[in-house]
Each structure stands twice: as structure tokens, then as C-alpha cells.
Amino acid sequence: MPAPLSIAQIAPPDPLPLPAPGWLLWSLLMLTFFLHMLAMNWVLGGSIIGAVTRVSRRTSPEADVLVGLLTRSMPSAVAATITLGVAPLLFVQVLYGRLLFTSSILMGWFWLSVIPLLIIAYYAVYALSFRGDRLGGLEAPLSWLAALCFMAIGFLYSNNMTLMLRPDSFVSRYLADGRGFHLNLDDPTLVPRYLHMLLGALATSGMAIALIGALRRSLDARAARYLMRCGSLWFVIPTAINVLFGLWWLIALPRETMLRFMGGSAVASGALAIGLLAALSALLMMAMALGREDPRGLIRGGAWSLGLTLVAMVLMRDQVRQGALEAAGFEPSPWVEPQWGPIVLFVVLLVAALAAVAWMVRAIARPASTS
């Protein structure tokens, strides 16, 4: 049986062994990407919600509470997103570096632009956090600048993560233009995938806002009610729309990959079923919360369902990658020489980092001192 055409366009494995068994690297990739996604969703979705709320808060005095929460948390959240994003990116490079490095070179200047975009957004959120009251008319434009930069970074990442799944196009793209100006705009999965992730970030941030309101109700009842209602709305509306974008993404997948979710793979089909049921469960509970005087129980239940949905989404993204790479004939390096010392050290430091992040989240979620 002839090898797939794309296999000839994939760089050969490096003459270096994998530093850990493949199953362990994959497991750490899934775990660290899930953690990165939690922080990233708050940054991306929260920056958009903050920009919208700054424009509309003149009609709602309680909106200042939400703006303050988002503004105070954003610098730390950006730092957490970057820190938690390093590990999954490294694991992707170890497992799929031959593909990711090639797609990154093809994108070239677009990929390098992630750094200046991130710096601009970081400066903007710091200015809003520490000098927001003195910015005057610049507050709203800076807020939108940060949100647009984060949206652009997400779009560039979506381009790279989808382009690496198309090794059959590597040579033709490079021969057409080797200067590093390629985007993956001709991929039918790019737009629905990006929109699905963007609305997912809005929904996750909305859930976090509602959950903070539920946990803070005994401290500030009026503000907590506002956070719960506003957060619920930001969850319900994007999630309802996202069902359509998720279906669009599924239909846009190559046939071989799509069939994995239609019974071709137990993992892919199971993740799709669990993710869909959990998302609909969270949507129902949060919609019911909008009509309740005391929605704290429903919000907590919705948060657990959303957590399960995010786990399923991580697995589904991986199944899309696995399906595309199997069709392309890609195989990871079979040479493994475990380095258990660095692996154990990584796990210990990861646990310590998570403890520090958990402490920061609790500190940020507490009401600001009025003294």
C-alpha cells in the first residue's frame, strides 16, 4: 500500500530520543493544556466582557463591580496564561515538532507578531489595572485594544495549530512563497474552530463571573446578584450560539476525521457525547438560574458541568489532531530514553505552581478593601 502523499513532506524524526514515554507526554499535554485553557479563557473572554461593560456601565452602577473585578485580575491572569501555556507548547513540540516547526516557518512573520501583540495587550491591561481612574477617555479604547490583541493572538494560534495538520500543503506553500507570509485561510475548519473557541472563552468567563458572585453573596448581596445575573447571561447566550458553531466545525472536518466522532473512535465519540450532554446541562442550569431569586446552587452545578465540558473539549481537540495526522501518515518517534529526574522535578514544580495560582485566584475573588 503506497504511503500517503503528505508523508513525503514531513521532516524525518530528529536523531534524539523522546525524554519520556509517549503516553506520559500525551497525558501531561492534556493536563497542562486544560490548565492553560482555564486561564486563557478568562483573559480572552474577560477582556471582551470588560470592554463591553465599560461602554455600557453608564446605565448600570453595579457594573463598576464587574469592571473592577476584571481589571484587578487581568495582569495576574495574563501572567498565568503565559506560564501555563509554556508546558503544553513544549509537549506539542516534543511530540509533533516536525509539523509545528514547519507550519511556524510557513507563517513566519505572523507567528513572530504574537510577541508584540502580547506586549501591547500586557501594557494595556497593566495601565487599566494601575491607572484606570486617571486614564479618562482612554480607558475604553485601551480596553478594546487589549481585547483585540488577545483575539488576534488566538486567531494566529488557530492558524498554526490547523496548518500543522496539513503537511500535504507544506511544500506547495513554501514553493509559492518562502518569505513566511502564509496563513491557513483556505482551511474550511479554521473559521468555525476559531469562533467556537472564542465563544467558549466568553461562556467560560461568564460562568466564572457568576460563580464569583455566588461565592461573594454573603459579603455584598447587591453586587453579587449583579455578578450572578450578568455572568449567567454571558454564559447562556454564547453557549447557545456555540452549539451551531460546534456543529459547523464538525461538518467542516475531513471525512476521515469526522467519522471518528460518529463511532469510528470510542474516545472521540465518547468525548463528543459527554461534552455535548455536559454543555447542554450547564446551559439548562444557567438559563434556570436567570429566573431564580437564589441561583447559587444552579450556578455551582453549572460550573461542574462546564468543567466536564472543558475536559471533553480538550480530548476532542486531540482527537481532531490524531485523526488528521493518522490520515497524513505521521508517526511519532519510536526512540524513547526516559529522563525521570527532570520529569519528577517538573511534576513537583507543577503542583507548587498550581497551589500558588489557586491562592492568587482566591485573593482576586475576594472583595476589594474599601478602607
Image: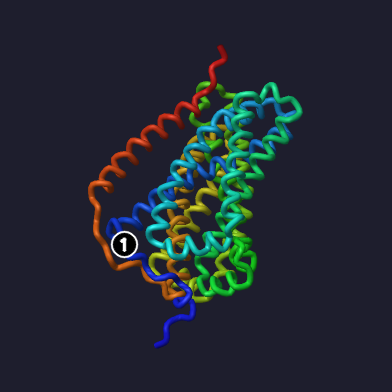
**Front in this rendered view, residue 290 or 230:** 230
In the rendered view of the protein, which quadrant contains the C terminus? top right
Tell me which residue sits at (41%, 29%) in the image. Answer: 359
* Residue 12 found in image quarter: bottom left
Number of dots carrying numbers: 1
Question: Looking at the image, which residue is at 50% across and 71% down?
Answer: 167
Q: Amino acid at mark 1?
A: Leu
Is 326 displayed left or right of 164 in the figure? left
- Report the side of 252 relative to 275 (left or right): right
Q: Is residue 324 above or below residue 128?
A: below
- Judge by depth and name the residue closer to the eye, 343 or 324: 343
- Of residues 12 and 340, the one nearer the viewer is 12
Q: Please rate how many residues cluster around mark 1, counting C-alpha atoms within 10 Å: few if below 14, some from 14 to 19, many from 20.
A: few
Q: Report which residue position mark 1 lands on.
A: 16
- The residue located at (47%, 69%) in the rendering is 261
Q: Residue at x 51, y 48 (%)?
A: 282
Q: Secondary structure at mark 1?
A: loop
* Front residue of this view, candidates 159 and 65: 159
Q: Estimate the x, y position of residue 20 in percent, counting from the top left.
A: 28, 56
Viewport quadrant of the N terminus: bottom left
State the image quarter where residue 25 is shown.
Answer: bottom left
